[in-house]
């Protein structure tokens, strides 16, 4: 991903950061908005909820431990704290074809092995990138007719008089 981002460019104000020789050090950073996004492999088989725990590293535990995202109104000052997000990728079968899933999460605590990492944001990025591109009604087929069968003879004479 690092090579792809560096080779194909990024949107304005975004840059690639982290040490490429270290595990979990591929990050996208937006210094203007004070956002850091760390790319990690989602681990649904190993961790409940799929989000990797921070582990024993105090630096990584500090990155996972952060205050809940709040609502900021335009008149309120923006917090100086960096918003650290995890971008979790996984290989999966999507509509019968091999594909990559992406999910952005905001952690609250470092987590403990065997339990879910506490989150206050989990957003799945669709393959096309748009949230409205894959909306479908997934209702069950109903055998019931919701409209009563109305017989013509029963309704004759019910016309509104003018």
Image (cartoon, helix red, strand yellow):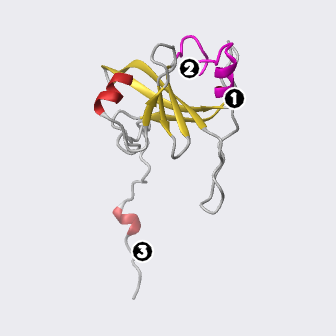
Give the mark, 1 or 2, whose residue is nearer the N terminus: 2
Does the magenta stretch mainly form a helix, a strand or a loop?
Answer: loop
Give the mark, 3 or 1, whose residue is nearer the N terminus: 1
Above or below, 19 against 122 in this view is above
Expressed as whole percent of the image width and height from the top left, the position of residue 14 reads 43, 39
Expressed as whole percent of the image width and height from the top left, the position of residue 71 reads 64, 51
Give the mark, 3 or 2, whose residue is nearer the N terminus: 2
Under circle 3, the secondary element is loop
| Residue ID for mark 1 | 65
The label nearer to you, 3 versus 2, is 2
Above or below, 153 against 139 in this view is below
Q: Is residue 1 visible?
A: no
Q: CA distance from mark 3 to mark 2?
A: 62 Å
Expressed as whole percent of the image width and height from the top left, the position of residue 92 reads 39, 18
In-image side of 31 versus 112 (left or right): left
Expressed as whole percent of the image width and height from the top left, the position of residue 87 reads 49, 28
User: For the image shown, how many numbered marks are present on the structure?
Assistant: 3
Tag of residue 6? none
| Residue ID for mark 3 | 158
Residue at figure coordinates x 36%, y 37% from the top left: 10
Residue at figure coordinates x 51%, y 14% from the top left: 23
Packing grade of label 2 (10 A; few <14, some 14-19, many >=20) is some
Q: CA distance from mark 3 to mark 1?
A: 69 Å
Q: Which residues are magenta?
A: 43-63
Q: Is residue 62 magenta?
A: yes
The label nearer to you, 1 versus 2, is 1
Quadrant location of the N terminus?
top left
């Amino acid at each position: 991903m690092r090579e792809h981002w560096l080779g194909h460019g990024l949107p304005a104000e975004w840059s690639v950061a982290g040490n490429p020789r270290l595990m979990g050090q591929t990050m996208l950073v937006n210094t203007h908005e004070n956002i850091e996004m760390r790319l990690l492999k989602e681990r649904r088989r190993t961790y409940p909820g799929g989000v990797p725990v921070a582990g024993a590293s105090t630096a990584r535990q500090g990155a996972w431990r952060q205050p809940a995202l709040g609502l900021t109104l335009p008149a309120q000052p923006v917090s100086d704290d960096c918003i650290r997000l995890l971008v979790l990728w996984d290989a999966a079968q999507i509509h019968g074809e091999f594909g990559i899933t992406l999910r952005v999460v905001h952690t609250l605590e470092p987590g403990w092995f065997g339990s879910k990492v506490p989150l206050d944001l989990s957003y799945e990025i669709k393959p096309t990138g748009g949230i409205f591109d894959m909306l479908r009604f997934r209702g069950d087929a109903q055998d019931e007719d919701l409209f009563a069968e109305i017989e013509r003879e029963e309704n004759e004479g019910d016309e509104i008089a003018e």
